[in-house]
Amino acid sequence: MVIKISAKSKPEETKKALERMARAQKKHRKKLSDFYGKLPGLYGDGLEYQKKVRDEWS
């Protein structure tokens, strides 16, 4: 988001624009899956992966 501030703009307008920008950023926080998708093959089946990891320690 871009906020343009001119010499004629009032400080209240600038504060409102910054508050709107902060609210918009809270709503659209980026996650790893936003960039790479769901990553289905990373661990495979979660239960099988967990059993394998716990077995290695035994």
Image (tube, rainbow, N blue to C red):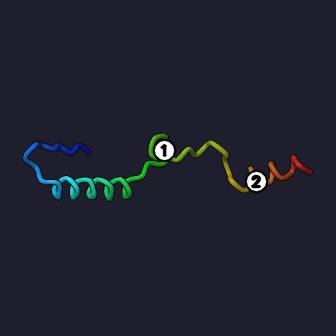
Residue placed under numbered mark 2 in the picture: 50
Please give the name of the residue rendered at 44% of the width and 48% of the height, measured from the top-left corner. 30
Please give the name of the residue rendered at 66% of the width and 47% of the height, measured from the top-left corner. 44
Residue type at mark 2 is Gln
The answer to whether marks 2 and 1 mark residues whose Cβ atoms lie closer than 8 Å is no
Please give the name of the residue rendered at 21% of the width and 58% of the height, measured from the top-left corner. 16
Residue type at mark 1 is Gly
Pinpoint residue 40: horizontal percent, then vertical percent. 58, 46
| Closest to the observer, 9 or 28 | 9
Q: Is residue 14 above or below residue 2?
A: below
Q: Is residue 20 left or right of residue 34?
A: left
Pinpoint residue 5: horizontal percent, then vertical percent. 16, 44
Name of the residue lying farthest toward the right: 58
Name of the residue lying farthest toward the left: 8
Residue placed under numbered mark 1 in the picture: 37
Pinpoint residue 32: horizontal percent, then vertical percent. 51, 45
Disc 1 crowd rating (10 Å Cα; few below 14, some 14-19, many 20+) is few
Q: Is residue 52 left or right of residue 39?
A: right
First in sequence: mark 2 vs mark 1 = 1
Q: In which quadrant of the rendered image does the N terminus lie?
A: top left
